[in-house]
Image (cartoon, rainbow, N blue to C red):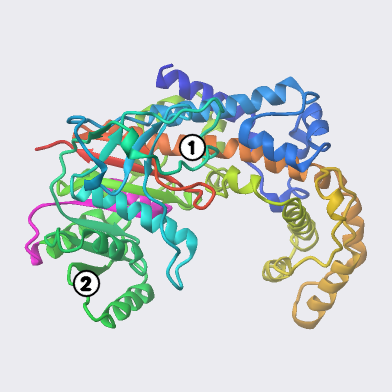
Amino acid sequence: MSRDDLLDRVLSLLSAHSWLYTFKWTELLSCPNFNPIEACPKDWSDALCNGRITDLQQFIISGQTPSSWPESLKAFASQCLTLTQELIRSATNTPPIIDSSASQSASNGVLSLNKSAGYLFYNIEPAKAAPRKVKQKKHHETEIMSAFLCDLLQNSAIIACNPCDSDKMSTFQTAPFECPMDSQNMQLYRIELSLLPMAFVDLGSGLGHLPRRVMQRLGTNCSNIRCIAVEADPKLHSTALNMESKEQEPKKRLIRVLSRIEKSNIDQFKGQLSEVLNADDLDGGYILCGLHCCGDLSEAALKLFHVDSNAQGIVLVGCCYHKMSLRDSGCQNFSFPLSLKLRSALQRCPPSAEKSLKMTVALRLACQWSPQQWSHWTPSEIYEHRVRVFIRSLLEVHLNPRSAPLENISSLKRLTRLPPVITLPSQSNLNSIKQPLPELNDHWRSLEAIAKSGSTARVDVEELIWLTKGGDKVWDLLPGLTALQQLIQPLLEALILADRLWSLESCSEVGYASLVRLFDPFQSPRCMALVAVKKTV
């Protein structure tokens, strides 16, 4: 299938089901223009409002459904899965190889292909327990990405010729995290990438967990390699410097830079970076990296990679797609959509297709929790989330109508943070999707008392009780609607990732580019890295 045909199919599916990603959960009861409850086909709604929670969880991971579910719903799930696979496959490329005489001893990990899901992944030995004060998610990400960067910096990356395969249909978001493979039973190839970096530049470095771990892995064998850790937050920058000053042997190879990188000031930052490299006698190139670069920082990183000839490679894991500024004057070439392919495909669609795709709610859905995470929620956790969303929607109607004063917004935010005052159904009944409306009278009275004591907003218990009774359709469909969004989330994210990769492929200086799954989506939902290397000059 050509990329044009693939994009036409993807955009057609998304346009036909835009009601699934163009609404705000907080406005389910107050926004008739984007009402997914009314837009959902009746036979879908009937199926999704009955049965078991575990049916929904199985549905989003494998596409398997009870036999009584409508064929159109099964077809939608199959299309979401297949098109997600095809988008990722179209943005996945096997790197050039040298020979088959490589061993794993010289590398930190092994690249492999998940043939059934269509993506490359990077595999290392399981990390030890996270250090004190470091969260397990951050530890997981830092261990894997530091190993991958070290393999690139030392030109020691290898790939297995034995692909991982499965008879189960899965995507980059739903496939289980690959366990370390026995390298003795694999034929390994050394990867040939034209990298001779003298440094790596870490954007959004924070406290510096990633560059410090890279330096530890490199040890004294690569004492010529430096790290430039770039951070925009003065407090984080200061804290990181203070932490390093207390070490017995400060990391002299770690250079910290306080700078805010934006798409509009890339030339300025490029000059600042050049000064830092020259001051340390680093006349070679560098690898650009970013671990969960938020919003515009990812697109700024891509622009820097394009315009700076010293940037030999890039390893970029993005996040917070909804924080991208899509109307940045003077930087249109580095705003979503980035690739000519996707821009052209959108021009073949009605204007509403692009408008829906660029809505903040759609981009936020693309970067929310992964289907794997939701599939591991207990029925109790799903019920509690269901209640919170329902309460938030009711309070939005009650406290934030068009005529409400601005002061109500702060009250609304404060009141919705409070835990629900409810009684959970018995554990034996929690797995049932069909649940009676929750008894919220005590919760409304609790909010009324809190509002009276320190809020300008007035909480009317009787009105909230009346609104609760009228929200039965929303309440019934909440778990099913969540499941439908979990089907479309990987597709939206795959489209953004493929668009970024294709934009790099179209650059004449780039010799190799691919998406690589680095992380376990159960621990780290933004699990895919965009990897690119420029041609040898």
Mark 2 / mark 1, whichever is N-terminal: 1
Residue 174 placed where, x, y %?
55, 38
Determine the residue positioned at 77% across, 39% down. Answer: 37
Residue 257 against residue 63 in the figure, above or below: below
Q: Split into 4 quadrants, where in the image is the N terminus?
A: top left
Residue bearing the label numbered 1: 172
Comparing 420 with 97, the one in front is 97
Q: Place residue 260 in its image quadrant.
A: bottom left
Q: Name the element at disc 1.
A: loop
Residue bearing the label numbered 2: 251
Tag 1: Cα neighbours inside 10 Å, few (<14), some, or many (≥20)? many
For residue 101, say whether it is visible. Answer: yes
Relative horizontal placement of residue 432, taking residue 161 as reference (left or right): right
Residue 333 placed where, x, y %?
32, 40
Residue 492 placed where, x, y %?
52, 37
Residue 318 against residue 35 in the figure, above or below: below
Relative horizontal placement of residue 465, taking residue 140 as reference (left or right): right
The boundaries of the magenta stretch are 278-303
The residue type indicated by label 1 comes to Phe
Determine the residue positioned at 12% across, 37% down. Answer: 536
Q: Place residue 514 in its image quadrant.
A: top left
The disc label shown at residue 410, or none? none
Q: Place residue 231 in its image quadrant.
A: bottom left
Q: Name the element at disc 2.
A: loop
